[in-house]
Image (spheres, grey):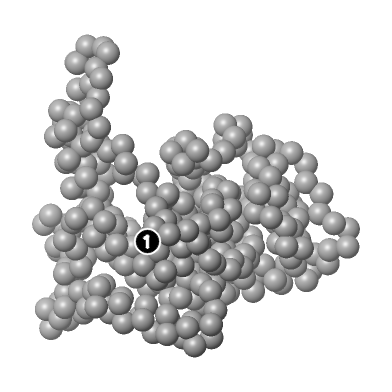
């Protein structure tokens, strides 16, 4: 019974109809209060995506009528990051690519940074102090750059560290209670936007709701797929381009669904083979996936799929035999 009903429930949860109802509710409430969109941002000093996001904030403020509140967190829920060491290594490499795409700054020396608890806490105190003082996002980005370059950072001697530590824990609780688990996230009226490569969804929403400062503003943070399927100039023997694109693919992962379709497009366009290596879903490897993580991934996949013109949202969970047969 559950399996037969589940696809309809998930399709409704991710439907544009429900999304429109939610947005109309928040827009009406904001109109009643005569306020501007309030973006709540959660950043983490040793999170590379947070550094990139802070660099992007001045651009958002120049383009849209918004108010931004930032909160620093220092800890992460280990349940959400079962392979934290691997996550940290990948996120630094990924941040370097994203910085190049969006013309942001991320130092190459960041790969050598050792995240010692004391230095992270000191830098977090300094960043929170800057936020409390109303410093510019450019100034805060410079402080984060100093951390990622390995420079020494001093926090004000007037800071009550015990009080700040409690604030950091309270910020983490706020992040969790609002329904998320990642730093470098923006919460705006019921929806989450993670990192710079989800800012296009936020920009599109702000434009649709009429909060652009200039007439007909253009979305700037939409370059993630801009160069996909571009002509490739082969300057060497074609045999050197015969190495397959390897896709580690989970039948239960929503991201794997759209990734497979994108991978097929890539390999077809560039004439290279694809090698799919199935992996067991986390829950079949004894790892717990909290509901807030699962629902964010599901809804995020929906909007990414919609952006790419992929039909998504009517699905059943293949956990167990479905995965094994696949």
Residue that extends furthest to the right in the rendered view of this protein: 157
Query: Would you name the residue on which mark 1 appears?
Result: 204
Q: Residues within 10 Å of mark 1 (few under 14, many from 20)?
A: some
Residue 203 versus residue 48 in the image, above or below: below
Residue closest to the far bottom: 32
Which quarter shows the N terminus?
Answer: bottom left
For the C terminus, give its image quadrant.
Answer: bottom left
> Is residue 110 in sight in this rendering?
yes
- Where residue 270 sits, quadrant-wise, is top left
Residue at 51% x, 46% y: name it. 88
Question: In the image, what residue occupies the spot 74% across and 39% down?
Answer: 151
Asked if 12 appears above or below 150 in the picture, the reply is: below
Q: Position of residue 249 (x, y in %)?
A: 24, 48
What x and y, as percent, mark residue 52? 54, 48
Query: In front here: 294 or 300?
Result: 300
Q: Secondary structure at mark 1?
A: helix
How far across and how far down the image is residue 92, in percent? Answer: 51, 41
Q: Residue at x 28, y 79 (%)?
A: 18
Look at the picture and state if 274 lies above or below 198: above
**In-image side of 253 versus 165 (left or right):** left
Which residue occupies the extreme front position in the image?
215
Left or right: 47 with respect to 156? left
Q: Is residue 284 visible?
A: no
Q: Nearer the viewer, residue 222 or 170?
A: 222
Nearest the eye: 4 or 313? 313
Q: How many marks?
A: 1
Image-based side of 319 in relation to 78, left or right: left
């Amino acid at each position: 019974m559950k399996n037969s009903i589940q696809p309809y429930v998930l399709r409704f949860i991710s439907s544009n109809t429900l999304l429109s109802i939610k947005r109309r509710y928040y827009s009406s409430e904001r109109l009643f209060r005569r306020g501007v969109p309030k973006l709540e941002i959660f950043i983490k000093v040793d999170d590379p995506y947070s550094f990139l996001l802070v660099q992007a904030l001045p651009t958002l403020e120049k383009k849209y009528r918004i108010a931004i509140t930032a909160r620093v967190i220092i800890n992460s829920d280990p349940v959400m990051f079962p392979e934290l060491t691997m996550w940290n290594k990948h996120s630094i490499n990924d941040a370097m690519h994203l910085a190049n795409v969006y013309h942001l700054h991320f130092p190459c020396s960041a790969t050598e940074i050792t995240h010692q608890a004391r230095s992270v806490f000191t830098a977090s105190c300094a960043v929170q102090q800057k936020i409390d003082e109303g410093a510019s996002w450019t100034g805060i980005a410079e402080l984060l750059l100093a951390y990622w370059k390995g420079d020494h950072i001093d926090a004000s001697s007037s800071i009550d560290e015990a009080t700040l530590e409690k604030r950091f824990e309270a910020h983490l609780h706020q992040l969790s209670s609002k329904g998320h688990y990642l730093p470098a996230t923006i919460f705006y009226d019921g929806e989450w936007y993670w990192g710079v490569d989800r800012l296009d969804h936020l920009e599109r929403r702000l434009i649709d709701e009429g909060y652009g400062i200039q007439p007909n503003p253009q979305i700037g943070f939409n370059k993630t797929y801009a160069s996909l399927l571009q002509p490739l100039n082969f300057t060497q023997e074609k045999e050197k381009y015969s190495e397959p694109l390897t896709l580690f693919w989970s039948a239960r992962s929503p991201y794997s669904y759209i990734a497979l379709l994108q991978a097929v497009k890539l390999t077809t366009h560039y004439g290279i083979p694809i090698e799919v290596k199935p992996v067991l879903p986390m829950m079949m490897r004894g790892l717990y996936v909290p509901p807030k993580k699962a629902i964010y991934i599901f809804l995020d996949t929906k909007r990414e799929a919609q952006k790419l013109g992929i039909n998504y949202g009517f699905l059943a969970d293949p956990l167990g035999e479905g995965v094994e047969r696949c």
